[in-house]
Image (cartoon, rainbow, N blue to C red):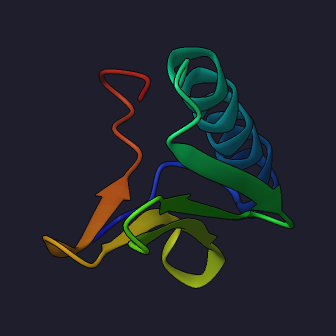
Amino acid sequence: MPHFLCVSDFQSLSYNVLDTLVNMIDNADLDGILECENCNGVVNISDTKGNVYIVSKHEPSLQIWVASPISGSVRFSYNKSLNV
C-alpha cells in the first residue's frame, strides 16, 4: 500500500488529530463520564465502567490505530484525495 505522507508530515498531522480528539471529548463530556489523556501520541480514554479505549499513532505504518474493549481494533490511513 503506497503512503502519500512523509514521516514528518504524518507526525504533524497525527499529533494534531489526537489533540483535536482530546479537545472534542473534553468539550462534549459535560457530565464527566470520560477521562481522557494524551501522552506522546497515545490517547487513553476511560469511562466510569472501567472500559479503556486507546487511540495512537503508529509511525511504521503511517496509521492511526484505535483499540476498543467493545469493538476491537481499527486502523486509519491518510487519504490524499480527501485530505483526511
Residue occupying the point 36% across, 55% down: 77
Residue 20's place in the image compared with 78, above or below, is above
Q: Is residue 44 left or right of residue 80?
A: right
Residue occupying the point 48% across, 77% down: 61
- For this rendering, which residue is in front, 71 or 76? 71
Query: Where does the image place residue 29, in percent across and percent down from the top left?
Result: 53, 25
Quadrant location of the N terminus in the rendered image? bottom left
The image quarter in which residue 44 lies = bottom right
The image quarter in which residue 70 lies = bottom left
Q: Is residue 55 left or right of residue 65?
A: right
Total residue callouts: 0
- For this rendering, which residue is in front, 4 or 78? 78
Residue 32's place in the image compared with 1, above or below, is above
- For this rendering, which residue is in front, 9 or 39? 39
Residue occupying the point 35% across, 65% down: 2
Query: Where does the image place residue 19, in percent across and percent down from the top left?
Result: 74, 37
Query: Where does the image place residue 59, in percent across and percent down from the top left?
Result: 64, 75
Query: Where does the image place residue 36, in percent across and percent down from the top left?
Result: 66, 50
Residue 54's place in the image compared with 16, above or below, is below
Quadrant location of the C terminus in the rendered image? top left
Residue occupying the point 58% across, 22% down: 24
- For this rendering, which residue is in front, 28 or 20? 28
